[in-house]
Image (cartoon, rainbow, N blue to C red):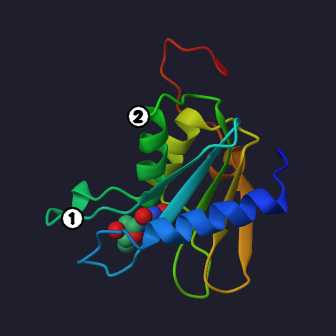
């Protein structure tokens, strides 16, 4: 798995927990924050944005990646992604987010889950979603 310094993961945790304060989650009351680290050191954050039509909710992970892409970042530009959830348990990302993450994160990119306690979990992108669906016209790894 690609290595990320503890200074970088601490910065990601601060950024993600701050982003969670902006979560729009009147239905679940579960504020989530995410922070994506780019290879030039830039950090993009996202929070969950819920909707009265529940299925339209955007998770924090997708919000962070979409913010990065909206600012010109792309496939392969990411060194790490970190997810912050409140409470004392780390929450792995949902299935929809895994597919979106796999679009932009290389298989060996680390994905961290942190919470208010000391617990930390980390997976490679490939561990979270092996055998990723790729668009039929794209060669694997392209
Ligand atoms: N949520 C995220 O933001 N990320 C995840 O990986 C799982 C769930 C959000 C969606 C919803 O707003 C709330 O958490 C409860 O499911």
Question: Disc 1 on helix, strand or loop?
Answer: helix
Ligand 1 neighbours mark 1 (CB distance < 8 Å): no
Residue at coordinates 80% horizontally, 61% vertically from top-left? 7
Residue 87 has which mark?
Answer: none
**Residue 135 location (% of width, % of height):** 48, 21
Taking the image as drawn, is residue 32 in sight? Answer: no
Mark 1 or mark 2, earlier in chain: 1
Would residue 45 appear left or right of 52 to someone viewing this image?
A: right
Question: Disc 2 on helix, strand or loop?
Answer: helix
Residue at coordinates 72% horizontally, 44% vertically from top-left? 109
Question: Against 97, is 48 above or below?
Answer: below
Q: Quadrant of residue 88?
A: bottom right
**Foreground residue, 117 or 8?**
8
**Residue 31 location (% of width, % of height):** 40, 75
Specify the quadrant that holds the C terminus: top right
* Mark 2 lies on residue: 70
Discs 1, 2 touching: Cβ within 8 Å: no
Residue at coordinates 43% horizontally, 43% vertically from top-left? 67
Taking the image as drawn, is residue 19 in sight? Answer: yes
Residue at coordinates 71% horizontally, 38% vertically from top-left? 107
Find ligand 1 in the image and state its quadrant. Answer: bottom left
**Residue 21 location (% of width, % of height):** 41, 74
* Mark 1 lies on residue: 54
**Residue 32 location (% of width, % of height):** 45, 70
Estimate how packed mark 1 is, as few (under 14), some (14 to 19) or many (20 or more) residues with alpha carbons within 10 Å: few
Question: Against 128, is 77 above or below?
Answer: above
């Amino acid at each position: 798995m690609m290595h990320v310094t503890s200074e970088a993961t601490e910065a990601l945790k601060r950024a993600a927990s701050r982003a969670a304060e902006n979560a729009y989650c009147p239905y679940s009351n579960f504020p989530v924050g995410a922070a994506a680290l780019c290879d030039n050191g830039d950090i993009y954050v996202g929070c969950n944005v819920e909707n009265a039509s529940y299925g339209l909710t955007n998770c924090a992970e997708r919000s962070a990646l979409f913010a990065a892409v909206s600012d010109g970042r792309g496939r392969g530009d990411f060194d790490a992604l970190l997810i912050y959830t409140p409470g004392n348990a780390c929450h792995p990302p949902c299935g929809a987010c895994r597919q979106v993450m796999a679009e932009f994160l290389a298989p060996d990119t680390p994905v961290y889950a942190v919470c208010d306690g000391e617990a930390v979990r980390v997976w490679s992108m490939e561990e979270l979603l092996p055998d990723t669906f790729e668009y039929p016209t794209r060669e694997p790894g392209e």
